Amino acid sequence: MRGSVAGLDTPFPLAAGVPGVLLGVGTLDALLAAFDEVLAPVLATLDSFDAYLDPRLAPADFLGWLAGWVGLAVDGGWSVERTRAVLAEVPELLRWRGTARGVAAAVRVLAGVEAEVVDSGGVSWSPRPQGPAPGGGAPRLVVRVPAGSDLRAVETAVLAAKPAHVPHRVQVR
């Protein structure tokens, strides 16, 4: 049973759950209508909550909060469309976070430039214990970006994506 309260269409009016003998008596109808008016927006929001979690569908004023849930600092200069596009890429960024691939993806998505990432790490296996370790001895990360890149945005992207213990350097090609 749907009801309309103060111009709001509410799918579950409270009066539908009250015995008919009590309706039309005293101020109960007005009290139920007041509760319906207060609860209708809450119920409408809960009914469409999944849309709030989708960056393509979420209201523009909710995007900053959604970004905070995934640890993304939204640049105040981004348009709503850019914010939506970046939020749509966050699962992929988090999947590769801490790797050279993840740093390159973060620079591409957050700073809008293609970067060449060189790291000193490596992965290997050995049939014997105490085999030689792959990569360089000291951790380091070099991110090379084209001339004219926004270095502040690149630096922010690298800091967000790299392991905290690895020193890095941004170079302009």
Image: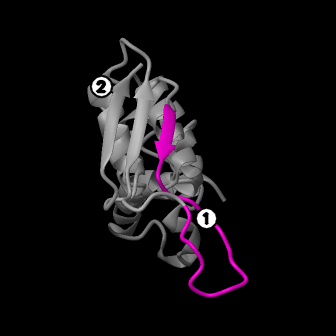
Q: Is residue 65 above or below residue 148?
A: below
Q: Main secondary structure of the magenta part?
A: loop
Q: Farthest residue toward the right?
A: 127
Q: Position of residue 33 (x, y in %)?
A: 40, 57
What amino acid is at disc 2?
Answer: Leu
The foreground one among 104 and 68 is 104
Which residue matches tag 1? 123
What element does badge 2 sit on? helix
Q: Position of residue 110 (x, y in %)?
A: 43, 33
The magenta stretch is: 116-134
| Residue 157: numbered disc | none
Q: Is residue 100 left or right of residue 111?
A: right
The foreground one among 10 and 137 is 137
> Residue drawn 57% across and 45% down?
101
Instruction: Please say whether residue 120 is one of the residues in the magenta stretch.
Output: yes
Q: Is residue 44 above or below residue 115?
A: below
Q: Is residue 146 left or right of residue 133?
A: left
Which residue matches tag 2? 151
What element does badge 1 sit on? loop
Dot placed on the residue nearer the N-terminal end, 1 or 2:
1
Tell me if residue 148 can be seen: yes
> Residue drawn 34% across and 56% down?
166
Q: Position of residue 23 (x, y in %)?
A: 48, 69
> Residue drawn 56% across and 72% down?
132
